[in-house]
Image (spheres, helix red, strand yellow):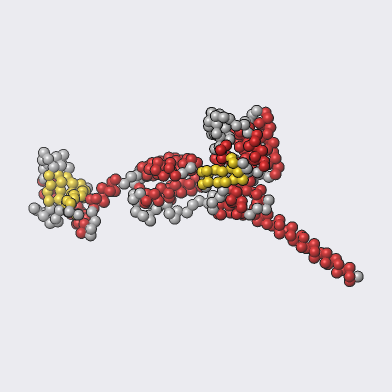
Amino acid sequence: MAKLTKRFIDAAKPGKKEYFLWDGELKGFGLRIYPTGRKVFVLQYRTGGRERRLKIGPFGALTVDEARELARQRRGDVARGKDPSAERNAERKTPNISALCSRFLEEHVAVRCKPSTQREYRLSCNRYIIPEIGSLRVTDVTRADLAALHQSLNRTPYQANRVLATLSKMFTLAELWGIREEGKNPARHIPKFKEKKRDRFLSADEIARLWTTLDNRVAAGSESIFVASAFKMLLLTGCRLSEIRLLRWEYIRGDVMILPDSKTGRRRIALSPAVLDILGQIPRRPDNPYVVCGKNPGEANTDLQRPWRRIREEAKLNDVRIHDLRHTYASWCLAAGHSLFLTGRLLGHTQAETTNRYAHLADSTQRDAVNATDVLLMSFVARNDLSTNKSVH
């Protein structure tokens, strides 16, 4: 075998079948010549008792010396126990981000997540992740890629952070599924945008105005008793929207409501006399197991957002969201003197940090108690001063 040179390769003619020219200087280094005339450098080697052949690159794009040096480096990898051909094949089989999103949604989200969380994950994948980086291979994605995607959504900080959280979960699962090396999650250490938390609570006057509006609309026939009762129960229980919208009669056990599968798992909620009175006024339909019935037989109400927009407009509460009724319950619970811990339990929080957003309201309640105690104690001091002044005179 002669040493491969440019002149030697240029002179080589294609045959009816592909054939190889092997280099006399570097073992296993050769040139593959196809019937079409295409010429490609290759490296043939043995590893694990098997013969392997690795494509180095096309002649023309690589000179003979460049191809020989690359082949020499790959032989060094083989000597160190690596298998360049198998690694390249595995890399080619690595799914792209679009495929990872599909597997994530089918195998994890659809099985383990609540419907509202499923919708959020699908939105992040289909609207933001796949259009931007869907074609990238999972193993090729860098922290810079994800940071750029996150930054491109800076005008909507909340959504940007949800997309980042989705990516973080996806790449954690990619490591678990053996698609990426462990400990290499590219979403880690990307700082989140600061989110402006809404602290909108209804005042006593606003609560009265909302209640009156609900009653008036039911009386006028412009709103069903199911819809009005749903909003009243949201206000009086602090429950999440889905917990009331999908509430079944079988979950009501006397003066207790037992939710078998809420966002935070099984919940047991004590019902106040006012809530029990509301439940007592809701008509039960024999063909429907839900408390808040929908238009179709056997179904729950599917949309409380549109009626809420009508109701809040009439009640002049245009900036109030349905979720703010839950915040209102928390704020008045604290105003009644209950602790953050108990308020968190009533709201179904699993982590104390979630309830801490209401800490300033607890401080306000404590301050009122401190001030009232201060007035009482200082009244004793004033009484003593008055008595002393009388004895002096």
Q: What residue is rendered at 46% in x and 46% in y?
A: 163
Image coordinates of residue 357 in percent, x first then y, are: 59, 52
Determine which quarter of the picture holds residue 184.
bottom left
Single out the residue that lies furthest toward the left.
Answer: 1
Residue 335, above or below 123:
below
Give the percent coordinates (x, y) of residue 117: 48, 43
Q: Quadrant of residue 286?
A: top right
Q: Nearer the viewer, residue 171 or 191?
A: 171
- Residue at x 71% of width, y 42% of height: 205
| Most distant residue in the bottom direction | 392
Q: Please state the horizontal and vertical placement of residue 114, each as a whole percent of the image.
A: 48, 42
Q: Is residue 288 visible to the viewer in this orientation of the structure?
A: yes
On screen, residue 356 versus residue 3, left or right, reads right
Say if residue 158 shows up in the picture: no
Residue located farthest toward the front when viewing the structure as drawn: 254
Pick the residue in front: 60 or 249: 249
Q: Position of residue 295 (x, y in %)?
A: 56, 29
Quarter of the image for the C terminus: give it: bottom right
Occupied quadrant, residue 39:
top left
Apparent side of residue 24 relative to residue 193 in the rendered image (left or right) = left
Total marks in image: 0
Q: Tell me the residue at 10%/46% (across/down).
A: 11
Front position in the image: 333 or 93: 333
Which residue is drawn at the image coordinates 68% and 32% (left, top)? Answer: 216
Give 335 or 166, whichever is nearer the viewer: 335
